Amino acid sequence: MRILITGAAGFVGGHLIRAFAEHGHTLAAIDLGSSPLFGEYGVSHHQADLLDGEAMQKVFRQEKPEAIVHLAAIANVPFAWEHPGRTMAVNVGGTATLLETMAKCAPEAKLLTIGSSDAYGLTAKCGKPLTEDMPCEPQNPYSISKLCAEQLSMQLAKKFSLKVIAARSFNHFGPGQKPGFVVSDFASQVAAIEKGEQEPVLSVGDLTAARDFTYIDDIIAAYVALTEKEVPTGIYNICSGKPRKIEEVLQGLLALSGRDIEVRKDPARMRPSEVPFFVGDGSKLNKATGWTPETDFRAGLEKTLEYWCSQTMKS
């Protein structure tokens, strides 16, 4: 299958390239950045702007994709607060241009657009696992933009008779993820402490919030299944379905470390979470594809910590 990936140079994109290549697919990428994986896996790379309709049509006519995976987005929440207009333009406008291009140049292709569980927002205060039919109450410009892009995708799919699948991915982690996410934040600091680059002290905030964590290999397996299998158009949660407190993440990484590390509660960080329980229900995806997460949580933490230790050794 000829697969076009937007945002392919990022954390998830790199893992997805490897997985699709192992399945024998022909790959093309749209990304203003680059990655050594493009050369390693023979990925046809286009530095096209998602908002440039003519450039997008040129890529589509050249690559003739049979499937598109849309990862490209502004995903940094603090950046989104500072630049809400830019965030909406890229995340919503870029998605609109992609769908318009698909309708003109590849109407028979399948689009897998990657959304975020953050779209559920305050709905999670119900304290129950979230299902796709629950309402969304997003609470920041990033999550609002992702929900808008998702809903626009669904409506344009109806208008143009396109095959569109929308994934709502919950927290995921693994090697290659940048700081700014809880597992990579903790793991990078533990690795720095092990290398003597940081004092053996971790300052933390509220550790009581429960979140849904899935290792990156399992997230990628879900994306591959949704791309390769025939599934009904619609929205699918990708999640473990298991609540884990932030404290469990921290203690798991500390147990893997060879150093005695002091954990200090920082009053400046001790803002209790407005949504203490945020967990998904992945039964719809399981029914459609048979997917279920397989990676042991501790094993995922270990692989993530090993990655960060290798990065500090190179510095």
Image (cartoon, helix red, strand yellow):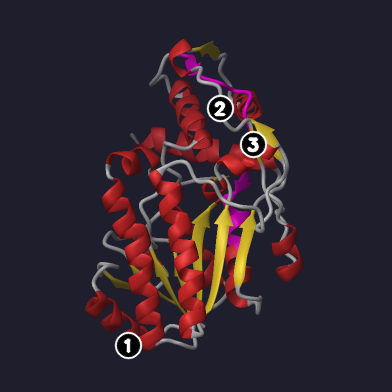
Q: Dots 1 and 2: beta carbons under 8 Å?
A: no
Which mark lies nearer to you, 1 or 2? 2
**Mark 3 nearby-residue class (10 Å; few <14, some 14–19, many ≥20):** few
- Tell me the kind of residue under disc 3: Lys
Q: Is 60 contained in the magenta span?
A: no
- In this view of the protein, can residue 222 be seen by the observer? yes
Percent x, y of residue 141:
39, 45
Q: Is residue 64 visible?
A: no
Q: Which residue is mark 3?
A: 125
Magenta stretch in the rendered image: 200-222
- Looking at the picture, which amino acid does disc 2 mark? Ser
* Residue 208 belongs to the span the image colors magenta: yes
Relative horizontal placement of residue 114, taking residue 29 as reference (left or right):
right
Q: Quadrant of residue 93?
A: bottom left
**Which residue corresponds to the image point at 54% horizontal and 78% vertical from the top-left?**
24
Residue at numbered disc 1 = 61
Q: Where is 156 relative to 258, above or below?
A: below
